[in-house]
Amino acid sequence: MYDNVLVATDGSSGTTETLAHAVSIARDNDAVLHGLYVVDRRLVLAAEKDTQDDVRQSLEEEGDVALDDISVGGEEAGLPVETRMTEGIPHKAIVDYAESADVDLVVMGTHGRTGRDRVANLGSVTECVVESSPVPVLVVHID
C-alpha cells in the first residue's frame, strides 16, 4: 500500500516519536523512507538584513542534524532512505515534495517548534498539510 513514506521534520524533539511511526509503516510495507526538512523562508526574511545569512545557516545546521536522525533511524531498520533539505514555506514545500517524490503517506507530529497552542489554529504547518495534501497524512500526537 505504501511504497514511499515521508517524514516531515522541523528538528524538534517530537520527531523521534514521529519517526518511530514512519519507520514501522515503511518497514511493514518495504517502503522507501523519505525525510524532509524545510528551511522556513519566512524566518530568514523576518531577520534583520545583516543577520539573514546567520539565520539561514543556523536553520540549515538544524536541518542537517534532523535529517541525519532520520537517515540513522531508517538505516538501522534496514530501510532505503532519501533525505532532502529545501527552503520555502513549510506546508507548501511538504506538499510539493509529496507530489514530486510520489509519496504515498506523509507522517508529521501534531506540533513542532511553533508549539502546542498553534495546533488548533489555522496556519499551523500540520493543519495546512492535512488540508492540502493529495495523499493521506498520519498525524502523530506529540506531548
Image (cartoon, rainbow, N blue to C red):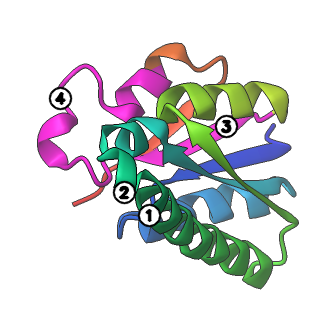
Reading the image, the residue beneath label 2 is 51
Looking at the picture, which amino acid does disc 4 mark?
A: Ala
Q: Which residue is mark 3?
A: 105
Q: Nearer the viewer, mark 4 or mark 1?
A: 1
Q: Which residue is mark 1?
A: 54
Question: Closer to the N terminus: mark 3 or mark 4?
Answer: 3
Q: Residue 13 in the image: x percent, y percent? A: 35, 70
Relative to 127, say whether 22 is above or below.
below
**Which residue ends up furthest to the left in the rendered image?**
117
Q: Using residue 79 as the reference point, say whether residue 83 is left or right of it.
A: left
The residue segment tinted magenta is: 103-130
From the image, tell me which residue sits under label 4: 120
Q: Amino acid at mark 3?
A: Leu
Q: Is residue 52 visible?
A: yes
Give the secondary structure at mark 2.
helix
Image point 63% across, 67% down: which residue?
67
Q: Residue furthest front?
A: 50
Structural distance between the alpha carbons of marks 2 and 1: 5 Å
Q: Which numbered disc, 2 or 3, marks the residue that appears first in the sequence?
A: 2
Cα separation, mark 1 vs mark 3, equals: 34 Å
Which structural element holds mark 1?
helix
Tell me if residue 128 is in the magenta stretch: yes
Q: What amino acid is at disc 1?
A: Asp
Q: Quadrant of the C terminus?
A: bottom left
Residue that appears at 56% across and 63% down:
60
Amino acid identity at mark 2: Thr
Q: Nearer the viewer, mark 1 or mark 3?
A: 1
The reply to whether callout 2 and callout 1 are in contact (CB within 8 Å) is: yes
Question: Can residue 136 be spotted in the picture?
Answer: no
The residues bearing labels 3 and 4 have C-alpha atoms spaced at a distance of 22 Å
